[in-house]
Amino acid sequence: MNRLADETSPYLRQHRDNPVDWYPWGPEAFAAARERDVPVLLSVGYSACHWCHVMAHECFEDDEVAARMNELFVNVKVDREERPDVDQLYMDAVQAMTGRGGWPMTVFTTPDAKPFYGGTYFPRDTFLALMESVDDVYRNKPDDVATNTAALVEAIDTTAGLTPSDEIPTVEQLNTSVQTLARAFDPEWGGFGSPPKFPSTFNIELILRAYMTSGADAAKRIVETTLDAMASGGLYDHIGGGFARYSTDREWMVPHFEKMLPDQALLAQTYLHGLVVMRRPEWRQVVQETIEYVLRELRHDDGGFLSAQDADSPGPDGVPVEGLFHTWTTEEVRAALARVKPEIVAETLEWWSINDEGDLDGDGAGRNIPNRAHHRGELVRTRELEATRRLLFDAREQRPKPATDDKVLLEWNALFLSSLSQAGAVFAHRPWLDAAIANAEFLIDNMRGANGRWYRSWQADGVPPARHDALAADHAALVDAFTRLAEATGEARWIHEARATADTMLDWFFDPVEGGLFTTAEDGEHLIVRQKDLSDTATPSANSLGALALYRLASLTGEMRYRNQADRILQLLAARLEGRVGLHSNALLATDIARRGATEVVIVGDDDHDMSEFVRVAHSIWRPDVVLAWGEPYDSPLWEGRTPGHAYVCRDHVCAAPVTTKEDFIEALTGMRPATPSD
């Protein structure tokens, strides 16, 4: 075993038996490189990454490759999910060098951690030749190395020195971004751009916001086409629920099969919002099955949510095969449905397009990904089909399962906590709300230190279990999650937790000079540069989600510091909008709230006034600019001078006349009076 045996990350522990003399990220590795005067070979990946496993098998498990690695370099392995600050720093360098990025990421640095060459996946022979070339350059061309490091450090340090705009993004910039996304839309299969296709939930949410404002058919078509296509293709697990990370093709048919917690969080939220706005019952099923997948497969007994399930699972010979767990032959289906009427078996095969030829190119084994691609949007199953789905699920459970990455990440848990709270409120489903409360309590009990500061990662077997200082993204997601949980449950304690976390975020991460949130805390580890996380990618940037969460919390608490700092974050982001459409869609969602203003809803009950029907209405009418205060009062102007038995609808803390009937409340909230039987 090497040094990774003592790490808590499942990804790092996967490499503990490699012949490579791995170090975890830390000062010990760079001290060894300085002592030996050799470069550092930095390898970054994550446990659910298929190509990370491929390179590990071809290179890091190979004695010849490992021996050369150990001779020429100090080798450092990083889990990008534990250390996204390190990952982003060197990914920016790789993209500056090659114009592309991805994982596994391979970077060569000087002993003081400055990058001078890098790339992504390298096959065995290419990697061996590359190591010889890098060694030669490092030893014989120091001026070239110095030139490269200077240029790359400058390239990756651009966010820290970004000068803010004089104002937050304008309405014109919002509209231009929506129009540009519409031009990138795939009118046949949905989504944006060419394969590989990612769900791009922030883009969909921005178009949904445009539809809510304008009612335009074009915006509605973009949302419906994309959500229907994603949920109908192989990207979605039709047997067990949940989404794979991305699709390799235009039709959302063939995914990379890893299933990751943040994707479930963001997609469940987007389908939930689409359901409330467009009233599509198929999307209700998608939300339910996605959430139940997480609660079934990724929930720790103590309430935390685990990170991911792998794309690969063991084949008959024990060798991992991507997608094997999720795909079917017709014989496997018939065996699982052996006691089902033949006509129902035939209907099942047809429903999910499972045939003898199979649909995996080059597979040769007749394996199929269950899908509804040829009947897009038709997802609601008959009673008979639901029964066969359960039988297929039970049969699939007997297969060797993909490995689960069992670390608990603060940011990802907070993203799912936010979605779970919203869904539990909209569906009025108490078990989901109980799971949300249990998750929030787990995070507080296990991932917050005695000094009130948060940790990013927790793993049950670790000593200690909680490690790595939380980053700005962790805090931003947690502020949003606690606020959403307060709105869902009416419990004041969650507003108190949101405020405490927001204060920590602003005290330790906010840039008082240029605005915006640094990725790392002021007292955190000093990397070669101190970046700001500004781009919305598979997850929201720390700054966009921080701004959104601060605006909503300011509306609920009346704390102007939160709004002022949210404005300064968006002013910084406004300086980067031009030419980066699609990388700031979540920031534009925050901008929409800032420009539109918040609608504050206060529902006041007591022992003599049951206001549960009012709360139910408020939860069922989702609007992005609405915040809700109900249940236990807390310190806020919204609660001052309120009368039990009344509901208040306010605009930027200026309230209309209170209402006492559900009909009047619906009219005050939506501008439309509900129809009565006499109408």
Image (cartoon, helix red, strand yellow):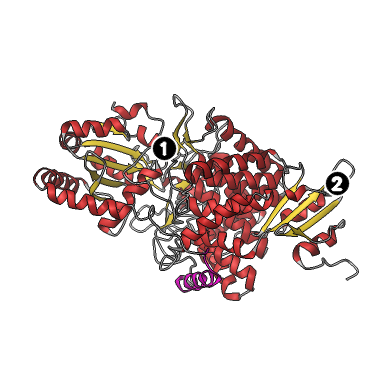
Quickly name the residue at label 1.
Answer: 524
Q: Nearer the viewer, residue 372 or 284?
A: 284
The residue under the point 48% across, 56% down is: 235
Q: Is residue 440 above or below residue 163?
A: above
Taking the image as shown, residue 222 lies to the left or right of residue 577, namely right
Label 1 to label 2: alpha-carbon separation: 48 Å
Q: Would you say residue 597 is visible in this rendering? A: yes
| Residue 172 counted in the magenta span | yes
| Residue 222 versus residue 92 in the image, above or below | below
SS of the residue under disc 1: loop
Residue 279 placed where, x, y %? 68, 63
**The C terminus lies in which quarter of the figure?**
bottom right
Residue positioned 40% across, 62% down in the render:
249
Residue range corresponding to the magenta coloring: 167-184
Callout 2: SS: loop
Q: Nearer the viewer, residue 71 or 547?
A: 547
Q: Quadrant of the N terminus?
A: top left
